[in-house]
Image (tube, grey):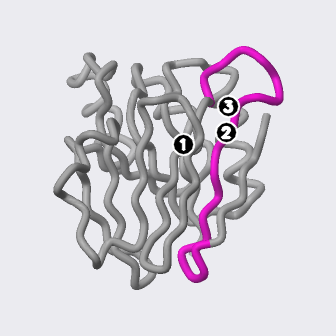
Amino acid sequence: MKIGVVSDTHDVASNVARIAEIFREAGVERIIHTGDITRARTLTALAAAGVPLAGVYGNNDVLRDELEAEARRLGFELHDGPLELQWAGRRLIVAHDPRELAGRIDPGHAVVLHGHIHRRILERSPERLTFNPGECAGHLAGHNAVGIVDLVDLDVRLRFF
């Protein structure tokens, strides 16, 4: 199962449209957003990828009612983090701020995803993959990135735009 991982979109509409296109072209089966969606129209744009989305709220997601209503309309799931998921036989834990994960990660978590710091993190150990795709709301073409994670072998492909 391939999933798309995106963080900190901050309502940059042109980038979000490109992200949906990247995920659609990559054939991801689901999307995880690690927070700071900011506006409901971001969820609407991500729906163009044509796959379910699960995610967590970030510190800039202050329009919760708007986000919740649009997520419900689209069949997406948004939660306060950390969010635990079980996909493709792997346990995932998702948070916006990596500090939310302190004391929450256990040996069964194969994938740890977070955002908030706008800096790419890709760490591997024999037990787990920790990943933050980094900046995706910037205005410098070629510096923004999202991730495609294969949950079978924990391969990570970065897509820059």
* Residue that carries the numbered disc 3 in the rendered image: 17
Give the image quarter of residue 142. top right
The residue drawn where x is 46% and y is 51% is: 32
Image location (x, y in percent) of residue 106? 23, 70
* Residue that carries the numbered disc 1 in the rendered image: 6
Q: Earlier in the sequence, mark 1 or mark 3?
A: 1
Q: Residues within 10 Å of mark 2 (few under 14, many from 20)?
A: many
Identify the residue at the far right of this view.
142
Image location (x, y in percent) of residue 21? 73, 43
Callout 3 touching callout 2 (CB < 8 Å): yes
Q: Which mark is residue 19?
A: 2
Give the image quarter of residue 64. top left
The residue drawn where x is 42% and y is 78% is: 127
Q: CA distance from mark 1 to mark 3?
A: 12 Å
Specify the amino acid type for callout 2.
Answer: Ile
Callout 1 touching callout 2 (CB < 8 Å): yes
Q: Which residues are magenta?
A: 136-154
Q: CA distance from mark 3 to mark 2?
A: 5 Å
Q: Nearer the viewer, residue 105 or 145?
A: 105
